[in-house]
Amino acid sequence: MQVLITLGSNINRDKNVYEALRRLEQQPDLKVLAVSPVYVTPAIGADGKAAAQPAFSNAAICIETELDPFTLRSRLRALEAAMGRVRTADKFAPRPIDLDIAFYGDRVLEVAGKVIPDPDILRFAHVAVPLADVAGDWVHPQTGQTLAAIAAHYSHQEMEIAQ
């Protein structure tokens, strides 16, 4: 199964996104097929507006795996915990790493309360643009749009590629 995963960090972000990618590449039952550029984006709060916290580094990867979505999500949560992530009720809190399943093939499902495809694809450039970089021709199963078309709706002015 091909799966799209988003990566984000705003605590030691220059190191953590690349470290998470390295750890994902070492997983024996995941094969990384494509990696987006890493983008630097402002932090966003629950209201969808800029938040008073450090900027994020965001990226996306396309992997191939035989893991079911529940096992994959557990694996991603374990990797987050190993990198110091402590989840709180505040979904928008600063974090050393955030790993989310954005697409699990063309399936629409819910995994432990998380809807897939990730609804944030349709809300935020920092999710849509990196995903379009690795799988622009993928079609969103609920909207019928390609990821490239979804990403094209966003202004890239606030997104810069990390050096």
Image (cartoon, rainbow, N blue to C red):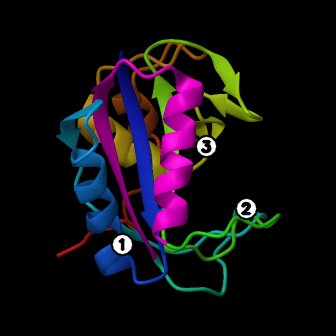
61 vs 104, left or right, is left
Q: Compare residues 118 and 101 and report the one nearer the observer.
A: 101
Between the residue at mark 1 and the residue at mark 3, the CA separation in whole angstroms equals: 21 Å
- Within the image, what quadrant is residue 131 found in? top left
Q: Which of marks 3 and 2 is nearer the N terminus?
A: 2
Picture residue at 43% right of the left edge, 47% below the top: 6
Q: Where does residue 19 sit, x and y in percent of width and height? A: 29, 66
Please state which amino acid type lies under the numbered disc 2: Lys
Between the residue at mark 2 and the residue at mark 1, the CA separation in whole angstroms equals: 18 Å
Magenta residues (range): 56-83
| Residue 50 visible in the displayed image | yes
Comparing marks 3 and 2, which lies closer to the viewer?
A: 2
Secondary-structure class at tag 2: loop
Quadrant of the image for the N terminus? top left
Picture residue at 34% right of the left edge, 31% below the top: 148
Q: Where does residue 75 sit, x and y in percent of width and height? A: 49, 42
Q: Which of marks 2 and 1 is nearer the N terminus?
A: 1
Label 2 belongs to which residue? 91
Q: Earlier in the sequence, mark 1 or mark 3?
A: 1
Label 1 belongs to which residue? 16
Please state which amino acid type lies under the numbered disc 3: Asp
Label 3 belongs to which residue? 120
